[in-house]
Image (cartoon, rainbow, N blue to C red):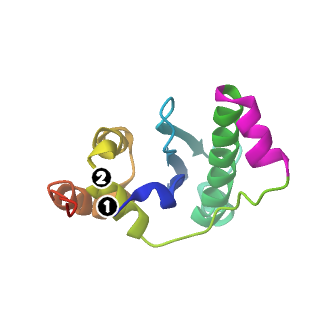
């Protein structure tokens, strides 16, 4: 099973709690120079916003949408800095470079591919999100599977 059809894979998480929130993105690019890109953002009420207003107006869905936009921009910037011709061909010349929500199947494919083991491990080391715990369990099991192609 090859994960290359599933790349780039962007995992975005967001969490809100008592007037604080954070979001993170993890991008598995499949590119040799930059195989893994990470970023995150923290939010809090500041001094003039009540916790109730913050919790009502700053929703996980909004934060996820914003963080995905940031992740897409970071991926495009990484591609541009790495190879301007490739960037022009894939992003600027009208090709569809859309992102679609998915289930955990693409992640499962990556977890079984030993080439991504250290990058996935880095994701779990960097994250502050409890939401990734189920994926960590999946990774711990699937990364132990040895795939042997038919000869």
Q: Is residue 134 above or below residue 26?
A: below
- The nearer-to-camera label among 2 and 1 is 2
Look at mark 2 in the image and give the residue it sits on.
Answer: 113
Residue 121 visible in rendering: yes
Q: Is residue 34 above or below residue 144?
A: above
The tag earlier along the polypeptide, 2 or 1, is 2
Q: Position of residue 37 (x, y in %)?
A: 51, 37
The span shown in magenta is 82-93
Pick the residue in front: 148 or 145.
Answer: 148
Q: Report if residue 6 lies within the magenta region.
A: no
Q: Which mark is residue 101?
A: none
In the image, taking residue 133 as reference, residue 140 lies left or right, namely left
Point out residue 139 in the picture as x, y percentages from the top left corner.
Answer: 25, 57
Label 2 residue SS? loop
Looking at the rendering, which quadrant does residue 83 occupy? top right
Q: Which residue is mark 1?
A: 135
- Horizontally, residue 3 falls left or right of residue 20, namely left
Q: What residue is drawn where x is 51% and y is 32%? A: 34
| Residue 18 in view, yes or no | no
Horizontal relation, residue 72 to residue 40: left or right: right
Q: Residue at x 25, y 63 (%)?
A: 138
């Amino acid at each position: 099973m090859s994960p290359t059809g599933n790349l780039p894979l962007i995992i975005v998480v967001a969490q809100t709690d008592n007037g604080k929130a954070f979001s993170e993105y993890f991008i598995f690019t499949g590119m040799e120079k930059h195989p893994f890109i990470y970023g995150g953002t923290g939010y809090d009420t500041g001094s003039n916003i009540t916790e109730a207003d913050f919790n009502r107006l700053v929703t996980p869905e909004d934060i996820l949408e914003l963080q995905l936009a940031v992740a897409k921009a970071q991926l495009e910037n990484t591609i541009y800095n790495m190879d301007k011709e490739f960037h022009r061909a894939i992003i600027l010349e009208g090709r569809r470079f859309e992102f679609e929500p998915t289930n955990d199947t693409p992640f499962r494919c990556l977890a079984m591919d030993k080439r991504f083991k250290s990058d996935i491990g880095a994701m779990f080391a960097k994250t502050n999100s409890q939401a990734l715990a189920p994926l960590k369990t999946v990774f711990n099991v699937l990364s132990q599977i040895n795939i042997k192609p038919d000869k």
